[in-house]
Structures are given as C-alpha cells and as structure tokens.
C-alpha cells in the first residue's frame, strides 16, 4: 500500500535512511538524522510537496518525496525527487510503483521538471532513473567526500508537463 507519509512515520523514515548514511555513499550525509529531525524534514517538505510511504503488512518499507530543487526563485518550476527503501526490500521491483505514485501526485502540483541527483558511482540508481524516464544530463565531479573517497554527483532530469511561458 502506498499512502501519504505522516508524522508517525518519522521513526521508520529515520531507520531506513540511517542505513544509507552509515553504510553507503548514496547520500552525502555523514550522521544519520534522528526521529525529531526526520519529523521536521517531513513537516517542512510535505507542506509544499508530496511525501509518500510504501507499506507491507503494516510496516513502512520505503518512501519517496519531492522537494525544493534550489533556493533561487527561478528554480521554482523544478522539483528534486528522492526514493529510499529499507535495505531488506531493495532490488525487489517495488521502486517503479512507488516512483510512479510520486509522479502521479506531482501532477497535482505546478512543477514542470523533476531532477534526480545521485552519487555517480551508484549504478543501480542510475539504471533506475533511466528506466523511470529520466535523462542523464551530467556529472559534477569530486563534489563530495565520504568513506575516504571523492564522489561525483550525477544529475538526471524528467519532463513532468509541457513547458510554457506561464510557469509557477
């Protein structure tokens, strides 16, 4: 089941995300946010963007959300999307269902472009982005440093609606 995330999901979100922070270079955070911080992030993001969770048998196994791409006003028609699954549920074919649900929710918003920013050494997420209709647009080389290695940030874009002069 896919549903809107709530404040009560903060613990599950923190648990899922902590794995990526501590054991991977998928996120460039180095300290996992606690429950309170994840609750604050959910509150701030969900005020203006969709934030979804996927449940199985009453357990949150993944989440996806859209958020602000950049702070400058001219970037307002663009949103950045993210998706994370509990490590035990990765690679089992659930990602497209959750991401498509996020795209469906984004139809209710005025965003024209979605951006996905992933670690350039993350081949699984790169393949996922391409399969979801994103177009690779480039790599920002050596912009992150984690786990004793320099990391690049690969950027992908996806058109969400027709571009016109009457943006947000």
Image (tube, rainbow, N blue to C red):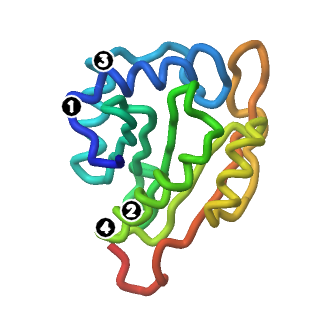
**Residue at the image position 78 percent from the left and 36 percent from the top:** 121
Q: Is disc 4 surrounded by few (<14), some (14 to 19) or many (20+) residues within 10 Å? A: few
Query: 124 and 111: which one is in front?
Result: 124
x and y, in percent, of residue 137 in the image:
72, 60
Q: Which of marks 3 and 2 is in front?
A: 3
State the residue position of label 2: 76
- Quarter of image, res 119: top right
Secondary structure at numbered mark 2: loop
User: At x 51% / y 61%, what residue is drawn?
Assistant: 114
The mark closer to the camera, 4 or 2, is 4
Q: What residue does disc 1 label?
A: 7
Q: Distance between the residues labelled 1 and 3?
A: 10 Å
Q: Say which label, 4 or 3, has the lower sequence index.
A: 3
Question: How many angstroms separate mark 4 from mark 2 (CA)?
Answer: 11 Å
Quadrant (top left, top right, bottom left, bottom right) of the C terminus:
bottom left
Marks 3 and 2, how far apart in space?
A: 29 Å
Q: Are marks 4 and 3 in contact (CB under 8 Å)?
A: no
Please tell me the numbered disc located at residue 109.
Answer: 4
Give 104 or 119, whichever is nearer the viewer: 104
């Amino acid at each position: 089941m896919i549903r809107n995330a709530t404040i009560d999901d903060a613990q599950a979100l923190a648990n899922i995300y902590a794995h990526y922070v501590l054991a991977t270079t998928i996120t460039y955070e180095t300290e996992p946010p606690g429950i309170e911080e994840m609750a604050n992030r959910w509150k701030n993001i969900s005020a203006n963007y969709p934030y979804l969770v996927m449940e199985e048998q009453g357990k949150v196994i993944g989440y996806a959300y859209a958020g602000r791409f950049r702070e400058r006003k001219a970037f307002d028609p663009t949103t950045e999307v993210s998706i994370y699954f509990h490590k035990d549920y990765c690679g089992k074919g659930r990602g497209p269902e959750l991401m498509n649900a996020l795209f469906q929710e984004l139809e209710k918003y005025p965003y024209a472009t979605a951006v996905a920013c992933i670690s350039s050494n993350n081949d699984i997420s790169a393949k996922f982005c391409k399969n979801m209709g994103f177009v690779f647009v480039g790599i920002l080389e050596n912009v992150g440093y984690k786990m004793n290695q320099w990391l690049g940030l690969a950027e992908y874009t996806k058109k969400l609606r027709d571009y016109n002069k009457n943006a947000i």
